Amino acid sequence: MKRLSPYIKDYVKRADMLLLALCVTCAIFGIVVIASATSTLDGGSTRYLIVQTASLILGIFFYALFTVIDVDSLAERWPALIAFEVFSIFLLLTPLGYADNTGNRAWLRFGFIGVQPAEIDKIIFIIVLAAQINYFKNYKNLNSPLSVLLLLVNCMFSIGLIVGVSKDMGSALVYLFIFIVMLFAAGLKFYWFIAGLAGLAAVTPFFWTHVLNQRYRDRILAPYDATIDPSGQGIRWQANQSKIALASGQLTGTGLYNGRQTQSGALPAKQTDFIFSVIGEELGMIACIAVIALLLLIIFRCIKVGVHATNTMSMLICFGVAAWLIFQTFENIGMCIGVAPVIGVTLPFFSYGGSSLVAIFAAMGMVSGIKYRPKPERFRSLG
């Protein structure tokens, strides 16, 4: 132990312990709420608590691991990372893959352990995209049509894998938002974003008609179209139950284990998609504001580390991780309050899900590692 003591002291001194403290606070807060949300489910909350607590411990380990790993060295092996991404997604087509209750084939089952490859692959996507943008920015012309086209192909390849194999539209949108934010942070000219919007508008009718099935079209339109789900038993019912739960909590909430919507089972996916509604009902608006404040602090911390990063690669990774958190936070809260489509995006740190929690802690570790290893700009070929 004495031999390890100097290394531990050095780690505590150089790593981003504030970021770790914020992340652990959110995760523990989430475990407390998950315990209440799952208390009336079959078998009670024990299984959920064990999984989420074990995932938190594993997440802290990966936070420490990714703090000391040189992500630049990982980025130089981006072809191997892409190969792993493809392999993990195509495993979903084997007997190891299984579909959730929404029909998304998004999980791998190893005995009693379930793994969601899309969560892990978000880290790979950020590292690979950062490496490629860094290469084009330092060695080519980032704003040339060829550079933009190649980066777009990389993004569409990852999104295509997710949508084509697992039908996970929520994760696909997270990838797209990360892509846009990282390009903006890299200094891509504004006219490319205008061109992107025009291109998106052009392909949307085809995508809407021939790619999205009716279930996803209903999920997107339900918050804005009262004629969808007129029986009130489907997607609009979910959104309505969420709003009822939030409204009933008022300022201070009804108390843990006392939420009527939560404990009666009227609130769907209460430990995952609608965990924010559970917080609102049982702990009130004050707790909701605290959750938003904690997540914003983590996001701002990621951005701050990125702004002060000493090389482009590190800056891009920080902004990519921040984008991941921004999209999932605002989309999840938006669908809980009925202003955003219900597309199965969880609330970072708070929602139940081992893969999600471990992956987000690993991503936070990458941000901590950038603070841990300050170094001058390194111009290296990543080809």
Image (tube, grey):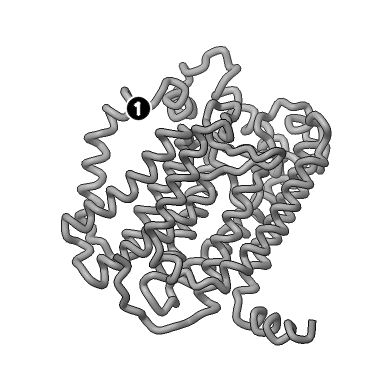
- Which residue shows up at 25% across the image and 34% down it? 203
> Residue 256 occupies which quadrant of the picture?
top right
Residue drawn where x is 48% and y is 59% of the image: 321
Q: Is residue 262 left or right of residue 73?
A: right
Counting from the top left corner in percent of width and height, residue 293 is at 61, 58
Q: x, y percentage for residue 132?
A: 32, 62
**Could you tell me residue 348's position as x and y percent?**
59, 51
The reply to whether residue 342 is visible in this rendering is no
Q: Residues within 10 Å of mark 1 (few under 14, many from 20)?
A: few
Q: Which residue carries the number 1 mark?
A: 211
Taking depth in this image into account, of 332 and 179 the one nearest to the observer is 179
In the picture provided, is 104 more to the left or to the right than 140? right
Q: Residue flagged by tag 1: what amino acid is it?
A: Val
Helix or strand or loop: what does disc 1 sit on?
A: helix
Q: Residue at x 81, y 39 (%)?
A: 45
State which quadrant residue 243 falls in: top right
Q: Nearer the viewer, residue 338 or 147?
A: 147
